[in-house]
Image (tube, rainbow, N blue to C red):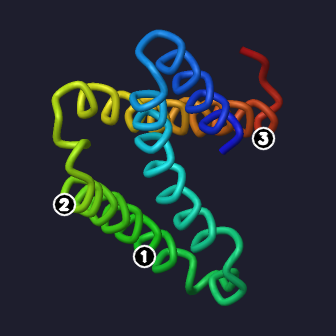
Amino acid sequence: MRAQISSVILFAALVTVIAGTSLGLTALWGGTISLIAYAWGGFQVWLHPGNRAPERMAGAAMRAEAGKVVIMLALFGLTFAKVAVMRELAHVAVLFPGFLLAQIAGWVQVARLERRLETERYGQDD
């Protein structure tokens, strides 16, 4: 999640400098939606004490992914329903890239960690 947090903060700071505080906060919120969902997934898979048992791991992973989707949809729905300014094109044009940047940073980090684990497991250097 450090990679995601770093990318979200950098993007929000860049948007703040270029377009202003309101859009910078919107970019930060877009990334935060992704971070909240990832935190839920990480808790379910890695930190929840009941999910450490091998027979519960597959179910925990499915609950984590389903929960991530529900959390993202709920937060986007609440954002657009309750905050009128978020329905403006400029805010939407910053909200979704902030969200996508955090998602992509998470995917890249997972791919890098998996690649490193494969290298360590088989003793190969790529």
Q: What whole-number distance in Å separates the C-alpha atoms at marks 1 and 2?
A: 26 Å
Looking at numbered disc 2 in the image, what kind of residue is underneath it?
A: Ala
Circle number at residue 63: 1
Front residue (pair 93, 6): 93
Q: How far is mark 3 from mark 2, CA to CA?
A: 48 Å
Direction from residue 103 to residue 56 in the image, left or right: right
Which of the two marks, 1 or 3, is nearer to us in this view?
A: 1
In x, y percent, where is residue 85?
A: 24, 42
Percent x, y of residue 44:
57, 74
Q: Is residue 89 left or right of residue 49?
A: left
Q: Earlier in the sequence, mark 1 or mark 3?
A: 1
* Mark seen at residue 81: 2
Q: Residue at x 35, y 69 (%)?
A: 66
**Residue type for callout 3:** Arg
For label 3, the SS is helix
CA neighbours of label 1 inside 10 A, class few (<14), some (14 to 19), many (20+): some
Write down the residue under mark 3.
Answer: 121
The label on residue 34 is none
Residue drawn at the location 41% of the way across and 71% of the way down: 62
Q: Amino acid at mark 1?
A: Arg
- The mark that comes first in sequence, 3 or 2, is 2
Helix, strand or loop at label 1? It is: helix
Q: Can you tell which quarter of the image residue 67 is in? A: bottom left
The front one of 80 and 101 is 80
